[in-house]
């Protein structure tokens, strides 16, 4: 009877540990995104990359998202900002909209400023916000060549694909 108890104990222990490891693996596989191997190359022999700062105010979440989708390219880096007058719910909604786009989620080249400073188009605060966003983009990723600031009211007239001769 003692040998049977040892055998059952070993069987149940092994089964329990196997199920525990399987459960931990399945949770970690779904919770942490795996890094995407990017074929995007940077350097002097490759097309230029842009650092975009797209900003807007209260109620501009959809405009910012539309503008981002219009100019989006995996080579570029994007920093989005809703002004201080926008609600936290609007910022959260923008972040959720970004996560719904597979390309943006895969390349991970879009960031949203969480707590913006109060800004006005009439004074120097707008220029300070633009310079601050350029420094944030440099800290996050300095692989871009040119910096472009766009308002939510702007709409691109020329896309990056097929127009490299304009930017060289």
Image (cartoon, helix red, strand yellow):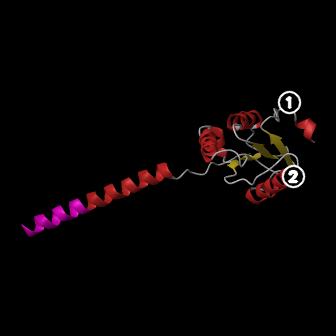
Q: Real-space Cα distance between discs 2 and 1?
A: 24 Å
Q: Is residue 122 visible?
A: yes
Q: Name which residue lies at 87% across and 33% down.
A: 163
> Between residues 38 and 141, which one lies in front from this camera angle?
141
* Position of the N terminus by quadrant: bottom left
Whole-percent x, y for residue 115 in the image: 68, 54
Whole-percent x, y for residue 98 in the image: 63, 41
Please provide the residue range marked out in magenta. Answer: 1-13
Q: Which residue is mark 2?
A: 127
Left or right: 120 as drawn, with respect to 66:
right
Q: 10 Å neighbourhood of mark 1: few (<14), some, or many (≥20)?
A: few
Image-quadrant location for residue 65: top right
- Of badges 2 and 1, the one in the foreground is 2
Does the stretch in magenta take in 4? yes
- Residue farthest to the left, as pictured: 1
Badge count: 2
Which of pointers 2 and 1 lies earlier in the amino acid sequence?
2
Whole-percent x, y for residue 149 in the image: 83, 45
Q: Name which residue lies at 70% across and 40% down.
A: 58
- Secondary structure type for disc 1: loop
Q: 10 Å neighbourhood of mark 2: few (<14), some, or many (≥20)?
A: some
- Secondary structure type for disc 2: helix
Q: Which residue is mark 1?
A: 157
Q: Is residue 46 visible?
A: no
């Amino acid at each position: 009877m003692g040998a049977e108890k040892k055998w059952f104990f070993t069987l149940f222990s092994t089964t329990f540990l196997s199920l525990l490891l399987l459960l931990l693996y399945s949770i970690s596989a779904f919770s942490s995104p795996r890094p995407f191997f990017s074929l995007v190359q940077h350097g002097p022999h490759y097309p230029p990359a842009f650092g975009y700062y797209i900003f807007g105010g209260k109620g501009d979440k959809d405009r910012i998202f539309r503008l981002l989708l219009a100019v989006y390219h995996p080579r570029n880096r994007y920093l989005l900002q809703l002004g201080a007058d926008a609600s936290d719910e609007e910022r959260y909604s923008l972040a959720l909209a970004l996560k719904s786009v597979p390309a943006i989620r895969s390349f991970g080249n879009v960031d949203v400023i969480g707590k913006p400073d109060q800004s006005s188009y009439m004074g120097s605060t707008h220029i300070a916000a633009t310079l601050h966003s350029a420094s944030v983009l440099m800290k996050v990723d300095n692989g871009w060549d040119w910096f472009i600031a766009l308002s939510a009211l702007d709409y691109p007239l020329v896309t990056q694909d097929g127009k490299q001769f304009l930017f060289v």
